[in-house]
Amino acid sequence: MPGVAQQAVLAMGGFFVLLGIILIIWNRREKKRYYDSILLTHRDIKESLTHDPERSWLSAWHIGGTVSFIVGIALLVLGGVLWLIGR
């Protein structure tokens, strides 16, 4: 595999790891913002304290970030192995 292709795999791996970290951080911020807004408007104090019922759409960022992070790690490992073999 040419050096350019190895660098492309490593770059994609780095991109997916970075994207995964950003999405996980975004998830924490959105959950905090959502549950803090409930507390401020006094709509439902029980929901803000117990987070029941669970809002599945709030977990979507976390799931996507985790998948992206795992794919990125796999690509980084693959790119590293190909780079070592190609030397």
Image (cartoon, rainbow, N blue to C red):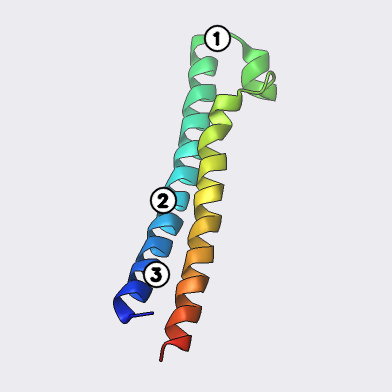
Amino acid on which disc 1 is placed:
His
Is residue 25 shown above or below 4? above
> For mark 3, what is the residue?
10
Of callouts 2 and 1, the N-terminal one: 2
Q: Residue at x 38, y 58 (%)?
A: 15
| Residue drawn 45% across the image and 44% down it | 23
> In the drawing, does residue 48 fall left or right of residue 16?
right
In front: label 2 or label 1: 2
Which residue corresponds to the image point at 65% horizontal and 17% vertical from the top-left? 47
Q: Determine the CA span between mark 2 and mark 1.
A: 34 Å
Q: State the residue lying farthest toward the top.
A: 43
Mark sitting on residue 19: 2
Circle 1 residue: 42
Q: Give the number of the mark in front: 1 or 3.
A: 3
- In this rendering, the answer to whether 74 lies above or below 23 is below
Quick one: SS at disc 3?
helix
Residue 1 appears in which quarter of the rendering? bottom left
In the foreground, 63 or 34: 63
Q: Say what secondary structure mark 2 lies in.
A: helix
